[in-house]
Structure formats: structure tokens, C-alpha cells
Amino acid sequence: MMLCPDMVRPNMARTKEFRAGGSFFDNFGGVLKELVARLGSAAATGQMRILGRSAARTGLIARGMAIIALGSLSNSLGSRLKTVLGRGGSRARPHPAVSLPEAFPAVDLAVADPIADILDAPAFQPCTEFFAANEAIERALVSPVTQALLFTLVRNIRPEHVIEIGTYKASTTEAICRALYANNRGIVHTVDPYGAGMVFDNLRKWPAVLRHHVCFYPTDSMDFYDLARHEGIRAGLVFVDGNHDYEFALFDIESAARLIRPGGFIIIDNVSQAGPYFAARDFLRNHPRWHECGHCIDNYRPEFPFDPHRTTIINTDACALRSPTNYFVGDRPTTRGQQIVTAGKIDGISLAVAEPATGTLYLQCVVRVFGTPPTEATIENTVTMSGTHGATRVPLQWKFDPKDVQFARTAELWLGWQGDQELELAEEPNLF
């Protein structure tokens, strides 16, 4: 389930603010219960799976602000829900204008470590002081420096999408939204399976122009990442501050890396704890094209395995990882995850080869049809390249049985490469 106050997203209905009023919530609750009851026989879309689990887990029927993706619902149920959601919202209280830091560091994102330039810039101190004086800092689990850093990164990157794993009381969410508001573009997708009512209580106090830039998901990060991948969300910045167990932190980092745009950032909080720290360290070991902005990871001292001061971003507990500016394929096969297939066939994949490539490309596509029963098949191809550069199409053919086109279908594309150097791609591989 996703809750997106006062905003419009592609394939999403218009949202409004809803305040406690019995008739509205009675109607909304009835439709939501009916929707959840139908999930078992409905098409298995990411939005509906999230809705079913989140409704049962968080009990959101009776409070807050809500929007549900309606594209996959039956016409009658969808229209009923739209009718209910269309009511109310006209009693929103007036809000003060959005205040912003007077200045922030404008930096060159082309350098390998722009975060060092941000921290050294004279404008960063007053930016930090702004967040230290903001009443929202009382609801935060991070420092004003962390919020100022996230604000400054968003102002410089100007992303369409930001992801926050771990909402708590939406204080850092608010700092990010201030930057998006100042940019006049972008959405922060914030994810937290706990305390949804607390999040709503804080969101409804925000100015409406800030709520326009937030989409809240009261579910766990696994559900969210699955939905985000199918929705085609690509983030310029991801803030990981969720479950700090090693396995959970590593999952959040690995999953964020699949969604990050080239040259984007993953900021990981609580690196004084072993779980997030070693998750980040192991991620960098397994992804050598990524690099850290700073020296928290490569300055590890075995004699201080639980060092509470290991971060090199002073007055934070964070480290920053940055993605490569292109996509690379090596001898270990790699995938960007499953893609939804809507066509009746697959003809191949399109590649944008960034640098002349000589070697052998190995491809496998795992085709899944979620019928009754679900089916799974693989198709493979091997292609020799000699100085290949630019737009390239590689055949990889599959035709769906006509009876399967009614079901949800996905294709999981894997690529491996043998050559003198890694295969460098300017864009993600795409099916055609």
C-alpha cells in the first residue's frame, strides 16, 4: 500500500488530504476490506501484494491519508474506491510558507567525491544551522549535519526520485522534501512498516506544497523494492536507515544499487554499528566499480571492530557510497532484476555499448508466467563482439502461448562477459 499525500504519479490516482470524519472512513474501510478479500484471485501485481500485506499489518483503514493504485482493479471496485477517495480534502487547514536554508553548497558532481567539497564549503555551516534550529529535528534520529548533507545532495542532484528506507517520524523525510520543493521537482519514496499512524500525524501538519513531494509506503523494504522495480523508479539518492541487522542492511544496499541512477549516492546511517558497517564494506568488496566518498570503509582497523567514531563525515554516523557512471558487465553474470512483460513475444535485447568491446557476451533470460500453475523457462544466447560500439541489438527470442497473455509475466535478464576488459554500457539493457 502506498500513501501519497497531495501528489500525482504516473499510473496513480490523484490524492487529497483526509481528516477524521466517520462517513468517509466507513466507506473507505468497506471498500478496502472488499479489495483485500479479492486479492487472492486478482492479478499478482506489486501494488496489490503490498496492499494486502500492509492492510493486515498496520490496520490503516480507520485513520490518516490514503491512496491506492487503481490500475489493476476491476472497473466496479476501482470506481467505487475512486468515488470514496474523491470526497473530502476541502477542509485542509492553511499552512505557513515553506522555509528554506538561505544558502547551500553548489558543487561539481563530476568529481569523484563531491561530499568532501560539500562539507568544506562555507555555505554548509549555515545550512546545518537551519536544520539544527528547525523544530523537526526534535523528531529526528539523525544529526542536523546528516539532514543538511541530504538536503544539499538533493539540491545538487535534482533527482526525480529519492528513496528513504526508515521513516520514523518523517523528520528527515521533511528535510529531503524541502530540497525537492526548492528544486520544484521530485518525489521521496519513504518506507517504514511500523508506526504508520505516527507518520500520518506528522505529515498532516506539513504545508501541502511539501506533501506534494512525498509518497509513504507502510510496508517493509522487500515489498517496496519489488514494487519500485516494476514501476521503473530510478533514484538519484537512497538513504538507508532501516533494520540495522547485517543481513537486512546488506539487502537494502544491494536492492538500492539496482535502482540507483549512474553516478547516484547511497547514504548509509548507523555505521558505528557492525551490521550496517560490514554490510557496506562487503557490498564494496563485491562491487569494485562502486566507491566510497570518504574513508570510513577502507580505514577499517581490526583492533577496533566496534569503533563508534569510524565515520569520516564528521558529526554524523553515516557513510556515502557512489555508483559508477555507467553499467559494467564482467565474468560474473549480473542482472537488474525481473522486468514486466506486456507483449506477446520477446525478440531480443538492446544494448548501448559505451566503449568499443571485443569479447564474448553470454545471455540468459528467465521467463515466468504467473498462471495456475506458474511456469518458468529459460532462453540463452552467446554473441561474439569485435570492436562493437554504440546501439546494438542481440537476438533472444521467445513467444508466449496465447493462453498465457492474460497472466502477469516477467523476464529476468542475466548477462556475463569474457573479454580483455569489462563490457561498459551507457544504459541498462532492455528487452524488445
Image (cartoon, rainbow, N blue to C red):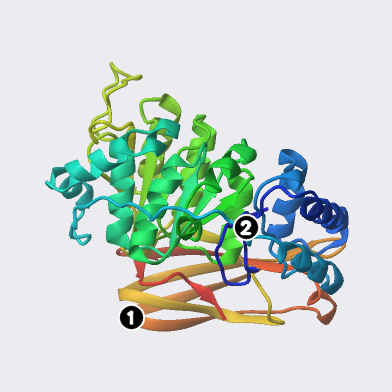
- Residue picked out by circle 2: 91
Residue 89 coordinates in the image, percent (x, y): 64, 60
**Image quadrant where one finds the C terminus:** bottom right
Q: Residues within 10 Å of mark 2 (few under 14, many from 20)?
A: few
Q: Quadrant of residue 160?
A: bottom left
In the rendered image, residue 326, in percent from the top left (x then y), is placed at 34, 65
Vertical order, 364 against 254 (above or below): below
| Number of numbered labels in the structure image | 2
Which of these two is toward me, 288 or 80?
80
Left or right? Give the position of 217 relative to 274: right
Q: Callout 1: helix, strand or loop? A: strand
Q: Is residue 422 above or below residue 191?
A: below
Q: Is residue 394 in view?
A: yes
Q: Earlier in the sequence, mark 2 or mark 1?
A: 2
Q: Is residue 73 visible?
A: no
Please, what is the three-letter code of the amino acid marked with disc 2? Arg
User: x%, y% of residue 424?
Assistant: 34, 68
Quarter occupied by residue 106: bottom left
Within 10 Å of disc 1 (Cα), the crowding (few <14, some 14-19, many 20+) is: some
Nearer to the camera, 291 or 192: 192
Tell me: 147 left or right of 16.
Answer: left
Picture residue at 33% right of the left edge, 36% below the top: 318
Disc 2 to disc 1, how far (Cα)?
58 Å
Q: Secondary structure at mark 2?
A: loop
Q: Which label sits on residue 389?
A: 1
- Classify residue 57 by image quadrant: top right
**Going 78% across and 77% down the picture, which residue do you hit?**
405
The amino acid type, in three-letter code, at marker 1 is His
* Residue 115: % across, % down: 22, 48
Residue displayed at 63% across by 41% down: 196
